[in-house]
Image (spheres, rainbow, N blue to C red):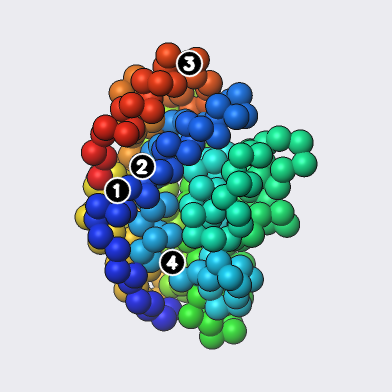
Amino acid sequence: MSSRAVKNISKQDLREKARMIRLETLRLTDICGSGHYGSTFSMAELVAVLYYQLLHVDPKNAKWPDRDRFTMGKGHAAIGLYPVLADLGFFPTDWLDTYTRFGSPLGDHPDMKKVPGADFSSGSIGHNLSVSVGMALGLKRKKSPGRVVCLMGDGEQAEGQVWEAAISGAHWGLDNLVGIVDINAAGSDGHPQETMKTEPLKAKWEAFGWRTFVLADGHDLDAVSDTLNRALNAPNGRPTCVLAYTVAGKGVSFMEHGWEWHLGFLGPKDLERAYREVMQGEVG
């Protein structure tokens, strides 16, 4: 795998980008009438570091062959990706105002045929690591410097296709592939480990042949930046998995640690409170 330069952005600027993700998630959910607050807030720092510091993409040439790819196994959190793509210039920011409205390219899940900057579509959970394996293998055979990052949820680890992909990634020695598991302990049916026990995840990923890093606090920007940089820029002949422990609903006190806000909608008073807490909070 080829290492790529890390872009220069301050910690405070990264913090503001993560704040923007949360604020826009609140706004777009209000447009839609329903949204995935918990799982989007939990990934905000991860996405901010990836897109503003580490991934090499070109908003003016969304299909650049040697770009880094980002796929979302947890595609229901696309509401937090769209503001980043718009902010970078992949599409006009006024598209955000049409989120999930009839005729809008921006649906609840990303559609690669409609959304510039979306590298693959999602729907049923569990498919995108398999897609990422194919992308990484293709890039490696073309001797491209491009890398592939797949963001998954902890509930997604119960999908058998994830583990078939994990076997394949290790078999092909795909050191240009990074899987990130957002372990926010919240799913649509409750705590993922109560729905289907998949722990110990570190031992499992290592047994499947992946170099595995544990990111104890997925909201600590210094730790996120360091861990993801090592995952992407320290080749060792095999794929890497980052187990990122996060807090569902991070940044809004009444949402934090609760699976009930995996999907929901805020009334006017709660929405005002959520905006205030995100604006005043210092996550990261």
Q: Which mark is residue 15?
A: 1
User: Where is 284 relative to 136, above or below?
Assistant: above
Q: Earlier in the sequence, mark 3 or mark 4?
A: 4
Q: Which mark is residue 55?
A: 4
Is 179 or 17 nearer to us in this picture?
17
The residue under label 1 is which amino acid type?
Arg
Question: How far apart are labels 2 and 4 at the CA level?
Answer: 19 Å
Q: Earlier in the sequence, mark 2 or mark 4?
A: 2
Question: How far apart are labels 3 and 4 at the CA level?
Answer: 37 Å
Q: Which mark is residue 268?
A: 3
Question: How far apart are labels 1 and 3 at the CA level?
Answer: 26 Å
Q: Which mark is residue 19?
A: 2
Residue 11, percent across and down?
24, 55
The residue under label 2 is which amino acid type?
Arg
Task: Identify the element where label 4 is drawn.
Answer: loop
Horizontal side, residue 142 vs residue 173: left or right: right
Residue 166, percent across and down?
51, 58
Is 275 or 198 nearer to us in this picture?
275
Q: Residues within 10 Å of mark 1 (few under 14, many from 20)?
A: many
Horizontal side, residue 83 vs residue 6: left or right: right
Residue 168, percent across and down?
55, 64
